[in-house]
Structure formats: structure tokens, C-alpha cells
Image (spheres, helix red, strand yellow):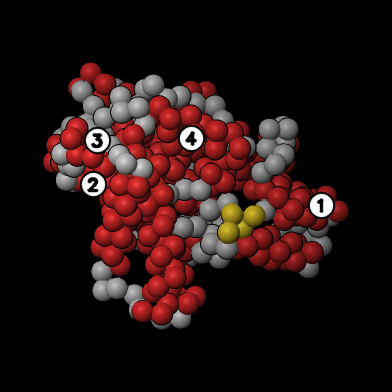
């Protein structure tokens, strides 16, 4: 393999496995050594980048990284003269002993329940979990949470300081605490999936492998007797409906442009099953509402057959119970296609103060301006602002293509 191919492979392995390795080493050597575990995993990845281009990729790259990271962690413990104290106090547990006492065999899930401890604030739980369980950078976490990168870094440092104290165990919470902790874990998975789906920076329209890994972990929770819940099922349905559109989404951002024959019918079917399961019980979470919206988009035979009236009603419910500028933006789009482009544009303009730094806002604004008044200076200005804010090469290319298409047609479509 070329150096470039090796670098891509290491990046893929890092995205997929770093959280699992950090969780495993932390479970094995104790929360007080979480920084050493994180450093050891990163050192192993750096070593892979140095050695694999010259000596070849190991037959089992994940096992290789796990072995190197474990040895580096032990070396660091010995260098800091902590190994003897650890041996006396902990008897060096095997990693699978910390995984919900064997109930769910995935270190990332056990770590997620630890990082979602109620002693952390809601945003700190998400930031710490995205960092330690899923290997997000602080800049990616900032985009996912719409927070300043330095603020994210400070939150993580404070959380890890508390985490190192050892008061927070890596295990399934007690029944009295399980529901609240599960709710926090679902929030993290929701944030992670959104970041992977939209990938606001870089040259990928989405990080499909990361999104599907999140869906895998969520299904693990949905199928386990102690963590199954209507909200878990609803979020699984939402993710399946979104993931079903992945094959058609590359190069085609909007549902209007996508070839629906490319959508994954098996995932759509699983989404329907989970949506049906989520109906048990009386509680209706935000995931229930968003999953139903996603189902209406996904199950429609064509874009024109979309039930916009029902979607607008669901967005009204969502905004009333769980208000957010992004939900209001999506509602404005639904109003544009369900009622009139002029009314949708009016709803959109009212959101500019809160979404002035969001590239998709200006992309939508350009589209609605074009549909109401044809090619104009305002349309081009909105496209330019969207491109200025965009940090994704694929999305930037899409903006260029739409701008050129609008310029070539003087009258509105």
C-alpha cells in the first residue's frame, strides 16, 4: 500500500476503534489513568503511520494497535511509578469484566454510560463522550454542539479531572439511575449521528462509517432488555430512515434531487419496525416526532407526494416542545413546499439573526429567493454567503453548481 493509502486506513481505524481502545484501557487500568490511555492510543496510531508504509499493514490492524497501545500504557505507568500501586489495588482487570458485567459486550457503551454521569452538565456529557468514546476532535465537537472550540476543550479538561477521581464507575447504572443515564446516552448518539451525517468540515459530504457505527451501538441498546425503551426505538427508526438515503445523498444534498430507487429498502423496513415498536408507552420524545417526519419523507413515492401538511404539523409540535433554530429552519422549508415559497421565505427571514453563521441557512435562502423572484443580485449574494461560511468541499461544490444553474436561468422555475 502507498503512504497515502496507509494514512487513509489508519484514519479509518482511528475513527472506528480509538474510542473502543481508550475505553478498554481505561476500564483495565482505572479512570485515574484515562489520560495515559488516551495518549497510548494516539501513540499507537502515530507508530502505525511510521511503520506500516515500510513494513506493510498487519493482518489484524486493530489487534496490532490494541497490543501496541496496551504496552505503551503499561510503559507509561511504570515510568510514572504507578504500576505497583495499581497492581496492589486493582489486580489489573481484563477489559470484558467492566462491560456491564458481561451483559453488553462493547467497551464503548460501558464508557458512554460513565461519561454520561449526572454529575456532569448535559453539554459536558455529550462533549466528553464524543471525545472519549467516538474519537471526535474538539473542533468537531464544537460544530456538533454549536460551541466555541476553546470552550469545548475547557469542558473536557474539567470533566476528565473529575473522571480521574475514580468516583464514576464504568458499569451499568443502578435501576434507579438507568433511565436518566440512558436519556443522556441517547442525546450523545443523536449528536454524533448528526455530525457524521452532515460532516460540516472536510471533504466528505458525510462520514458514513461513523454514522453507521453509531447506529450499530444504538441498536445494541435497543435490543438489550435493560436498555430497550420507546425513545431508543424512536431514535433507531430516525437513524435508519436517514441512513437509508445515504447511497443517493452523495452529490445530491436535497431530497428533490435524489434518486429514490437508490435508497436502501432494507434500512427503510427496519426504520418502520423500530417506529412501530416506539409507539408502546405514553411518552413521546423528540425522537418520536423527528422519526415520524423522516418516515414521511422516506416513504413518499416521490418528492411531490410528500405529505407536507403533516410534516408542518409535526414541526409545530417539535418546536413547541423542543424549540431550536434548526427545527424552525426545516419548518420554513416545509412551509415553502407545502404552502408557498413566499410564505416559506418570510418564515426563513425571521431566523437570520439566530442562523447568521450557518451556511445551510443561506443556501436555503438563495433557493427560495430564486423560486420567488428568479435570478437576482439577492440570490447571488446568498449563494456567496453560503460559500463563505461553508467548510465542506463537497457542499461548496454543490453551492457552486446551484449558483451557476440559477445564473443560467433568468426566470424563476
Mark found first going from the N terminus, 4 or 2: 2
Q: CA distance from mark 2 to mark 1?
A: 49 Å
- Marks 1 & 4, CB-CB < 8 Å contact: no
| Image position of 196 with respect to 276: above or below | below
Q: Position of residue 62 (x, y in %)?
A: 29, 62
Give 267 or 107, whichever is nearer the viewer.
Answer: 107
SS class of the residue under badge 1? Answer: helix
Q: CA distance from mark 4 to mark 2?
A: 23 Å
Single out the mark in the foreground, 2 or 3: 3
Q: CA distance from mark 2 to mark 3?
A: 28 Å
Q: CA distance from mark 1 to mark 4?
A: 38 Å
Mark found first going from the N terminus, 2 or 1: 2
Q: Label 1 belongs to which residue?
A: 381
Give 335 or 386, whichever is nearer the viewer.
Answer: 386
Which residue is found at the position 42% from the left and 33% from the top? 160
Single out the mark in the foreground, 1 or 4: 4
Within 10 Å of disc 1 (Cα), the crowding (few <14, some 14-19, many 20+) is some
Mark found first going from the N terminus, 1 or 3: 3
Q: CA distance from mark 1 to mark 3?
A: 64 Å
Q: Label 4 belongs to which residue?
A: 156
Q: How many marks?
A: 4
| Image position of 17 with respect to 56: above or below | above
Q: Label 2 belongs to which residue?
A: 106
Which residue is found at the position 39% from the left and 21% from the top? 119
Single out the mark in the foreground, 3 or 4: 3
Q: Position of residue 196 (x, y in %)?
A: 47, 51
- The residue sitting at the left extreme is 102
Q: Is residue 97 visible?
A: yes
Amino acid at each position: 500500500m502507498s503512504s497515502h493509502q496507509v494514512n487513509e486506513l489508519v484514519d479509518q481505524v482511528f475513527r472506528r476503534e480509538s474510542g473502543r481502545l481508550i475505553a478498554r484501557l481505561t476500564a483495565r487500568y482505572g479512570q485515574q489513568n484515562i489520560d495515559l490511555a488516551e495518549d497510548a492510543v494516539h501513540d499507537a496510531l502515530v507508530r502505525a503511520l511510521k511503520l506500516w508504509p515500510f513494513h506493510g499493514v498487519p493482518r489484524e490492524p486493530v489487534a496490532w494497535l490494541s497490543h501496541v497501545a496496551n504496552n505503551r500504557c503499561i510503559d507509561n505507568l511504570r515510568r510514572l511509578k504507578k504500576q505497583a500501586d495499581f497492581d496492589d489495588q486493582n489486580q489489573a482487570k481484563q477489559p470484558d469484566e467492566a462491560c456491564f458485567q458481561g451483559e453488553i459486550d462493547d467497551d464503548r457503551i460501558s464508557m458512554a454510560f460513565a461519561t454520561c454521569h449526572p454529575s456532569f452538565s448535559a453539554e459536558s456529557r455529550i462533549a466528553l463522550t464524543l471525545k472519549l468514546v467516538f474519537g471526535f476532535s474538539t473542533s468537531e465537537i464544537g460544530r456538533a454542539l454549536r460551541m466555541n472550540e476553546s470552550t469545548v476543550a475547557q469542558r473536557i479538561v474539567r470533566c476528565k479531572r473529575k473522571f480521574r477521581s475514580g468516583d464514576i464507575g464504568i458499569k451499568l447504572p443502578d435501576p434507579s439511575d438507568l433511565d436518566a443515564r440512558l436519556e443522556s446516552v441517547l442525546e450523545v448518539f443523536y449528536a454524533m449521528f448528526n455530525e457524521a451525517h452532515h460532516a460540516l468540515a472536510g471533504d466528505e459530504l458525510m462520514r458514513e462509517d461513523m454514522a453507521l457505527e453509531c447506529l450499530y451501538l444504538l441498536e445494541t441498546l435497543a435490543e438489550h432488555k435493560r436498555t430497550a425503551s420507546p425513545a431508543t426505538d424512536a431514535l433507531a427508526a430516525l437513524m435508519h430512515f436517514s441512513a437509508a438515503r445515504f447511497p443517493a445523498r452523495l452529490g445530491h444534498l436535497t431530497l428533490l434531487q435524489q434518486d429514490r430507487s437508490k435508497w436502501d429498502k432494507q434500512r427503510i423496513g427496519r426504520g418502520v419496525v423500530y417506529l412501530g415498536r416506539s409507539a408502546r408507552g405514553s411518552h413521546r420524545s423528540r425522537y418520536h416526532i423527528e422519526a415520524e417526519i423522516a418516515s414521511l419523507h422516506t416513504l413518499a413515492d416521490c418528492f411531490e407526494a410528500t405529505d407536507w401538511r403533516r410534516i408542518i404539523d409535526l414541526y409545530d409540535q417539535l418546536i413547541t416542545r423542543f424549540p431550536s433554530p434548526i427545527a424552525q429552519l426545516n419548518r420554513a422549508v416545509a412551509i415553502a413546499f407545502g404552502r408557498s415559497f413566499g410564505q416559506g421565505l418570510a418564515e426563513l427571514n425571521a431566523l437570520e439573526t439566530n442562523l447568521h453563521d450557518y451556511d445551510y441557512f443561506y443556501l436555503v435562502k438563495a433557493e427560495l429567493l430564486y423560486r420567488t423572484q428568479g435570478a437576482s443580485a439577492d440570490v447571488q449574494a446568498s449563494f456567496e454567503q453560503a460559500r463563505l461560511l461553508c467548510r465542506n468541499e463537497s457542499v461548496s461544490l454543490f453551492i457552486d453548481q446551484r449558483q451557476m444553474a440559477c445564473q443560467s436561468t433568468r426566470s424563476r422555475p
